[in-house]
Image (cartoon, rainbow, N blue to C red):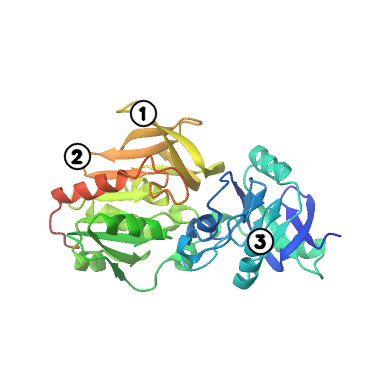
Amino acid sequence: MSDAYLALETGDVVEANARSPGQARGELVFTTAYTGYEESLTDPSYEAQVLTFAYPLIGNYGVREERFESDRVHPSAVVARELTDDVAEWLTEEGVPAVDGLDTRDLVLDIREGGAMKVGIAAGPDATPEDARAQLEDCPHMSDLTDIGSRVSVDEPEVHGDGDTDVALVDCGAKGSIVSELVERDATVHVLPYDTTPAELAAVDPDVLFISNGPGDPANFEAAETLVSEFVGDLPVAGICLGQQVVARALGGATEKMDFGHRGVNQPVLDYDSGRVVMTTQNHGYTVAEPGDLDVTQVNVNDDTPEGLDSEELDVITRQYHPEANPGPHDSLDFFDDVLELASSRTTVTAD
């Protein structure tokens, strides 16, 4: 007997089994990754979304905290064909509703054909379809979540590592692996709040300005965009995922919402200079529509969306995918070496 319901924006209500009770709403998206569920569930880029796993069995190697990308689960709710007890118990402890026992193949096809959509979920012994519909009715669009950065960013600056290169990482929802990769390369990483001001950044006196990944619409990260506008040309600039979108917007570019985004660990990316195709990990629902003052150096093989933006003149390098590869292939880890090489062109910066 079903004790969970998903009310879709299409008007359909899908029955399921409750594995972690509660009610939730969010943007319904899917990932094609078949491993790395711990990393995906703790990825801040999934904030305010309902994550559907396309792979049918989630949890077959347990739950280990050392694999987490942040200190909590970020999706509003979780959907799978089958969740193991380990994952279900973890999500219950986290207070995140979770359901299984439904045909996720149909759900993924609905998203691919109709695009990412709003969903309401009600799970538990007293759940009703009306509860799920009420959640759907109150569900905002992702672009309306203007405060989403405050949900995923540090409140106060943090410092990690003690290396020779000072990286100012603006935390728009940064994965922990980004910090780890930089520290392993002898960097001191200053993790700064998403709303850091130009004066506060100048006080850090970094060698590189790095805009992190994060959830939602890049247009809602105006403070980070201002930092790029203020310091580009004087300070090398890098970005990952949402960071690429923010950097492009700051340099005269434009971004747009994708139909259903890129989420998984097998996205092929073509590098124009080398002619090489690498496999990448991705998690984003927005993309760069116009690159502005930047050159498109890499594209997605499947749909030609920009995956890499560079400018030798401005010392800018960004990637739409996740080079830290947790989970996923390690084909693009050298991005972090390229970022730190930008520090050689660094000058002392001041805020206007």
Depth order, front residue of 97/297 = 97
Depth order, front residue of 315/100 = 100
- Quadrant (top left, top right, bottom left, bottom right) of the C terminus: bottom left
> Would residue 21 be found to the left or right of residue 76 on screen?
right
Q: Residue 25 carries which label?
A: 3
3D distance between C-alphas at marks 3 and 1: 41 Å
3D distance between C-alphas at marks 2 and 3: 44 Å
Q: How crowded is mark 2: few (under 14 residues within 10 Å), some or many (20 or more)?
A: few
Q: From the viewer's perspective, is the residue at label 1 or at label 2 nearer?
A: 1
Could you tell me which secondary element the residue under label 1 belongs to? Answer: loop
Q: Are marks 2 and 3 in contact (CB under 8 Å)?
A: no
Q: Position of residue 239 (x, y in %)?
A: 34, 50
Can you see residue 266?
Answer: yes
Residue at 50% across / 56% down in the picture? 39
Depth order, front residue of 267/291 = 267
Amino acid type at image mark 3: Arg
Q: Where is residue 97 in the image (x, y as percent from the top left)?
A: 67, 65
> Would residue 85 be found to the left or right of residue 149 on screen?
right
Position of residue 160 relative to residue 10, above or below, is below
Residue, far right: 1
Q: Which residue carries the number 2 mark?
A: 313
Q: Residue 276 carries which label?
A: 1
Amino acid type at image mark 2: Glu
3D distance between C-alphas at marks 1 and 2: 24 Å
Can you see residue 291?
Answer: no
Amino acid type at image mark 1: Arg
Position of residue 276 relative to residue 160, above or below, is above
